[in-house]
Amino acid sequence: EVGPVEKINTGVGEGRLSTFVASGSFGSQIFGYRATLLTTQFQWNVVCQCSSQREFTAYKAMFRKIIESAGQ
């Protein structure tokens, strides 16, 4: 399940960011951010994930800061 996509500004230029929930092992779920960052020559696909909703809520701001600081 993918959340809404939003534009973000990073050190390498504009990117796209969305939250997701995916199936993990043994029936568990994975929660996280998925980001795509584009440069003139490369595409970076960044995934930050946690094994619980509670962990993701706690680390969400840090994950976003890491993604937005790419290329700085």
Image: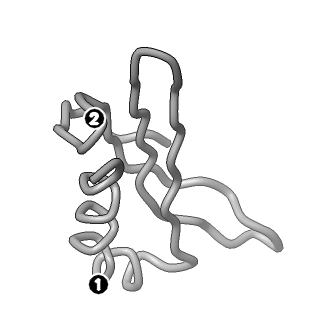
19 horizontally vs 50: left or right: left
Give me the C-alpha separation between circle 1 and circle 2.
20 Å
Q: Which numbered circle lies on residue 4?
A: 2
Residue 5 is drawn in which quadrant? top left
- Is tag 1's residue or tag 2's residue first in the polypeptide sequence? 2
Identify residue for label 1: 58
List the single residue furthest toward the top.
40
Where 58 sits versus 63, above or below?
below
Residue 10 is drawn in which quadrant? top left
33 horizontally vs 24: left or right: left
Q: Please state the horizontal and vertical placement of residue 40, each as a whole percent of the image.
A: 41, 15
List the single residue furthest toward the right.
26
User: Residue at coordinates 27% horizontally, 74% vertically from top-left?
Assistant: 62
Q: Please state the horizontal and vertical placement of residue 33, each as a whole percent of the image.
A: 41, 54
Where 39 sits versus 62, above or below?
above
Mark 2 belongs to which amino acid? Pro
